[in-house]
Amino acid sequence: SEAGAKPRGALIVVEGLDRSGKSTQCAKLRSFLESSGHPTELWRFPDRETSVGQMISAYLSNKSQLDDRTIHLLFSANRWEKRSLMEEKLKGGTTLIVDRYSYSGVAFSSAKGLGIEWCKAPEVGLLAPDSVLYLDISPERAAERGGYGDERYERVDFQKKVSEFYQTLRDSSWKIIDAGDSMEEVEKKIQQVVLDKVKECALGKSLSLLWS
Ligand code: TMP
Ligand code: MG
């Protein structure tokens, strides 16, 4: 980074099917980075705290019905409403671990039959992650985990389609982590990848935009 300028934080996105262990691993990663001296916040999308987020949450818990394109755009709006704060945090030196991002947006909506390009369009111009970690688990194994089936998309047949679209979206920069390994194994693998990335960003790796 430039002399006197603060090293920027890294934008780390964690993706995967429902019940792949993202939330647990994100929390562990956050404590790890903090204890290694890197200011870190844990974010998640959907962010159910905002008014848009409350509409999304009602939809996911089947308390409301929305047209497929409408809910897609709400998920996207929920990211746009946090974009400026996101940039501010990163430039101020805070690393953000983000539990789901635009890839969820595209994979889940495409799995319903909406076109991929249509789904990507509203994401263009959001901040691009410095690293995407994909917690890889089969839809069948995920379904055996506790709490499965509570929300709208938690059905094995649907999650199979979602995993196919994740495969279409991913590129060689994604880190694919076997989420069927023990929690400790997964935790260690993630730590290695992320620590390297945090250092790269602190040394001046520039922020870029989706979708490229
Ligand atoms: P959560 O369980 O991580 O809170 O996510 C809720 C559900 O919303 C999950 O099934 C994935 C889905 N989702 C989308 O369909 N589009 C999106 O943009 C995001 C962030 C999540
Ligand atoms: Mg869920």
Image (cartoon, helix red, strand yellow):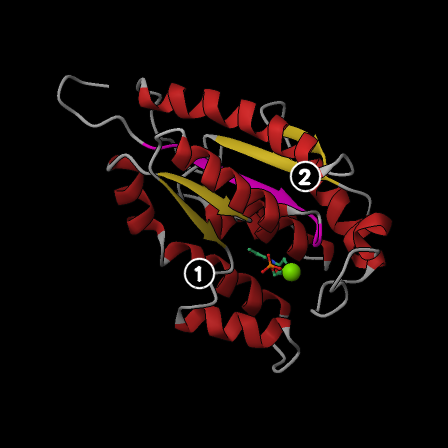
The picture places residue 196, in percent across and down from the top left corner, at 47, 20
Residue visible at 41% across and 34% down?
Answer: 35
Residue 150's image quarter?
bottom right
Question: Which is closer to the viewer, label 1 or label 2?
Answer: 2
Q: Is mark 1 within 8 Å of ligand 1?
A: yes
Q: Amino acid at mark 1?
A: Asn
Q: Extreme left residue here? A: 4
Q: Is mark 2 within 8 Å of ligand 1?
A: no
Q: Amino acid at mark 2?
A: Leu
The label shown at residue 78 is: 1
Give the CA separation, mark 1 to mark 2. 23 Å
The disc, 1 or 2, on the residue closer to the chain's N-terminal end is 1
The question of residue 11 being in magenta is answered with yes
The picture places residue 1, in percent across and down from the top left corner, at 24, 19
Say what secondary structure mark 2 lies in. Answer: strand
Give neighbour class at mark 2: few <14, some 14-19, many 20+ (Cα, 10 Å): many
| Residue annotated with mark 2 | 135
Please say if 136 is above or below 111.
above
Which region is colored magenta?
Answer: 9-19
The question of residue 117 being in magenta is answered with no
